[in-house]
Image (tube, grey):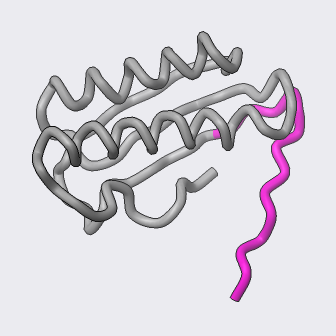
């Protein structure tokens, strides 16, 4: 079954959550949480993402983002954060496979 398209209208605030694969505690160490946040702030710098609040826990992240630019900012932000965080973690740990469970929820 196809997934429904997401429409991120400018001016709205979104609460986004993204959970680690199989609810594992892949973000339990401060170093991994810091790297995730570094990519979040890199997205802010590159894409102009408006970050209102955030929380990084041991197995998921919460973001509160205002969409001020256009429909593509939130998907591009999540692609950068999720892709780079998972890629770096897997390389460092010599691990393969998914880092994140399913797609993010908004």
Front in this rendered view, residue 67 or 1:
1
Report the label total.
0
Residue range corresponding to the magenta coloring: 1-14
Task: Name which residue lies at 88% across and 39% down.
Answer: 9
> Residue 3, position in %: x, y?
71, 74
Placement of 23 over or under 38, stated as above or below = below
Could you tell me residue 58's position as x and y percent?
Answer: 21, 42
Residue located 17% across and 51% down the image:
25
Q: Is residue 50 magenta?
A: no
* 83 relative to 21, above or below: above
Front residue of 9/39: it is 39
Q: Spot the residue most to the bottom.
A: 1
Locate the N terminus by quadrant: bottom right
Looking at the image, residue 62 sits to the left or right of residue 72; the answer is left
> Residue 91: x and y, percent?
20, 43
Would residue 9 be counted in the magenta stretch? yes
Question: Residue 97: x, y in percent?
Answer: 28, 64
Please tell me which residue is depicted at 16% across the width and 24% down the height of the picture. Answer: 31
Residue 99 found in image quarter: bottom left
Q: Main secondary structure of the magenta part?
A: loop
Name the residue at 38% across, 54% down.
19
Q: Nearer the viewer, residue 37 or 17?
A: 37
Image check: 56 left or right of 71? left
């Amino acid at each position: 079954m196809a997934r429904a398209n997401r429409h991120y209208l400018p001016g709205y605030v979104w609460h986004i959550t993204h959970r680690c694969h199989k609810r594992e505690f892949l973000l339990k160490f401060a170093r991994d949480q810091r790297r995730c946040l570094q990519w979040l702030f890199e997205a802010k710098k590159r894409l102009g993402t408006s970050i209102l609040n955030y929380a990084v826990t041991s197995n998921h992240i919460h973001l509160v983002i205002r969409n001020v630019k256009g429909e593509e900012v939130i998907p591009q932000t999540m692609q950068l954060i999720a892709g780079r965080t998972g890629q770096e973690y897997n390389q460092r740990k010599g691990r393969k496979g998914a880092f994140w469970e399913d797609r993010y929820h908004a």
